[in-house]
Amino acid sequence: MQKLIIAIDGPAGSGKSTTARAVARELNYLYIDTGAMYRAVGLAVLRAACEVDDAHVAGLLSDMSIDLERNGDDQRTMLNGEDVSGAIRTQEVAEMASAVAALPSVRAALTKRQREIGQAGAVVMDGRDIGSNVFPDADVKIFMTADAAERARRRVAELHGRGQAADFDVVLAQIRERDGRDAGREIAPLKRADDAVDLDTSGMGIAEQNSRVLEIVRRKMVGKKD
């Protein structure tokens, strides 16, 4: 089996996590949801009710363990031995994850961990800076996006599916604010790698976007055999 490192980046709601999970399942690769790691830190900060600055969060990190465990075709996120896979999927945690992701201590610690997990290959990793920062030499780099309104609709549907209340206008404003924050941070901003393949998923169904990404990956696999 070819052990490629596949990096799928993009803003919130672009469909990258759904597709990364499906591609990993199809290839029998390990799926690594890097966003879940930042959400776990965000959840820990919310629980600790501490200041969101490098000094306070670095103190939390020193006693924090974050592990990603394979659970059939999915992934469980463990925070200090607790399964927080569900707890990290709220809008409040998502907002805090974006805030802590701008802190140098958090970026350094989680980037190091992500490289340790993915360096052996046969992984599909999604996030915002995988192809540009975590694995700049990844075998396949894809930058997925969609217009903000489309991403907001997807997010509202996702939250409603979990039984959580969500207002479209509020979610749209949050997505636009997060886009600006993620793209504007000084350390490892949301950025398309120069050699990434662009994939706009606006108007696409899940099956189509999964198929498009698998096509890109398989072309790379054929090329590496030559």
Image (cartoon, rainbow, N blue to C red):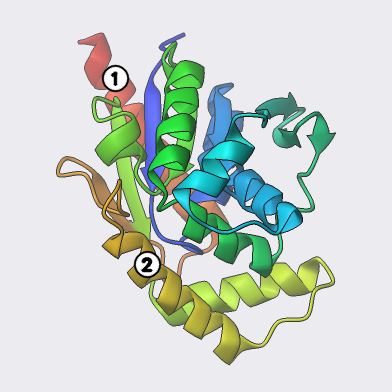
Residue nearest the viewer, comparing 79 with 150: 79
Name the spot of residue 37 as percent of width and height, x first: 59, 40
Q: Quadrant of the C terminus?
A: top left
Which residue corresponds to the image point at 65% horizontal and 45% vertical from the top-left?
40
In the image, which disc is placed on residue 181?
2
Q: Is residue 109 above or below residue 14?
A: above
Q: Is residue 121 left or right of residue 35?
A: left
Report crowding for label 1: few under 14, some 14 to 19, many 20 or more residues within 10 A (C-alpha): few
Question: Residue type at mark 2?
Answer: Arg
- Choose the circle earlier in sequence order: 2 or 1: 2
Q: Mark 1 — residue? A: 222
Q: Amino acid at mark 1?
A: Val
- State the separation of the CA atoms marked 2 and 1: 38 Å
Q: Is residue 23 left or right of residue 156?
A: left
Q: Quadrant of residue 154?
A: bottom right
Give coordinates of residue 32: x percent, y percent: 55, 32
Say left or right for 69 vs 82: left
At numbered mark 2, what does the secondary structure look like: helix, strand or loop?
A: helix
